[in-house]
Image: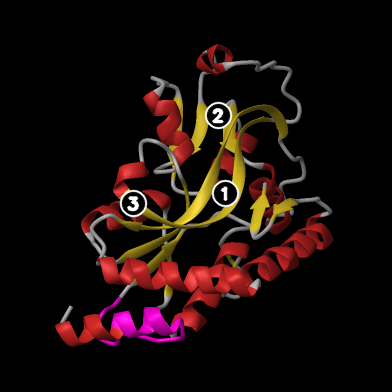
Amino acid sequence: MSQLSRWLWLFCLLAASPCGVADERLRIITVEEPPASFMLPGGQMDGFVVDVVKALQRQLNDQNPLELMPEGRAMLTAQQESNVLLFSFSRTPEREAAFHWLLPVLKKRWQIYLPQQSTLQLNNLADLRQLSSIGVVRGDVRESYLIQLGFTNLVAVTSHQQNLQMLHSGRVQAIIADSLELAYLLRQHTDQHTAPKLAMTLRSSHVYLVMPKTADPALVAHWQQAAKVLQQRGELEQIAVLWQQRIQQELNINVLRDGHLLLF
């Protein structure tokens, strides 16, 4: 970035006003994970965190497109390229040093689901190790967690929809997901009549907008300042309230909220 561009970044930060930098392209990447981010049948991107990112873009006068890709590819892109904004990714000790954690947006539970007709009882990690197969999404933080614990019975696919299909077809005994992901997927695919049943909750994580540690510091500061401005204006909380109401209306699920954070 040129010296002139850096002065422009500084001016934008001090003014706390919408500003763009024409010579610095940022890749903005997300994954299919409703209700945070997902693709509508017509090809338009929707989601709670999609709306948060779009609000930040308006504040920054940022015109970069939102890209949707499999989670493993998104993480690889962030490792290979510097100026990348990823959403929405869980904050874990293993990831801590690799990213700038720009803005928390939600908290989600890591849950194990079984087919509705299953008679299995799962109470702990030892029970999970006894399963013949557990469906996970490749690159997902929950897959990484189980791999680090030494699990060798994981079957990885590229999307939550494929994961759910494997469970319905009997190709895996269990899957790892959360209740809202499954509710949206089941609503989109009405041919799958039987919802899986919750067997156990592993843990939970806070989920963020992130940039790699190699990103340009001025770019990181620019987005952090925009998030601070929207938070102070109450705009982020307004988005959370609207999605809290929308989820209740569309799915009849009560989602808790803590300020601008949704708690799944």
* Residue linked to disc 1: 161
Could you say which disc has been placed on residue 132 in the image?
A: none
Taking depth in this image into account, of 30 and 218 the one nearest to the observer is 218
Secondary structure of the residue carrying tag 1 is helix
* Residue linked to disc 2: 172
x and y percent of residue 244 in the render?
A: 75, 60
Comparing marks 3 and 1, which lies closer to the viewer? 3
Secondary structure of the residue carrying tag 2 is loop
Q: State how far apart marks 2 and 1 are (Cα).
A: 14 Å
Q: Which residues are magenta?
A: 9-25
Residue 43 figure quarter:
bottom right
Q: Residue 51: in sight, yes or no?
A: no
Q: State how far apart marks 3 and 1 are (Cα).
A: 28 Å
Residue positioned 33% across, 51% down in the render: 99
Q: Say whether residue 99 is left or right of residue 174.
A: left
x and y percent of residue 5 in the render?
A: 23, 84
Residue positioned 57% across, 75% down in the render: 44
Q: Is residue 233 above or below residue 209?
A: below
x and y percent of residue 236 in the render?
A: 62, 68
Residue positioned 70% across, 70% down in the render: 238
Taking depth in this image into account, of 140 and 232 the one nearest to the observer is 232
Residue 16 figure quarter:
bottom left
Q: Earlier in the sequence, mark 3 or mark 2?
A: 3
- Mark 2 is surrounded, within 10 Å at the Cα level, by few (under 14), some (14 to 19) or many (20 or more) other residues, namely many
Residue farthest toward the front in the current orientation of the protein: 14
Could you say which disc has been placed on residue 99 in the image?
A: 3
Q: Residue 153: in sight, yes or no?
A: yes
Q: Amino acid at mark 1?
A: Gln
Q: Earlier in the sequence, mark 3 or mark 1?
A: 3
- Mark 1 is surrounded, within 10 Å at the Cα level, by few (under 14), some (14 to 19) or many (20 or more) other residues, namely some
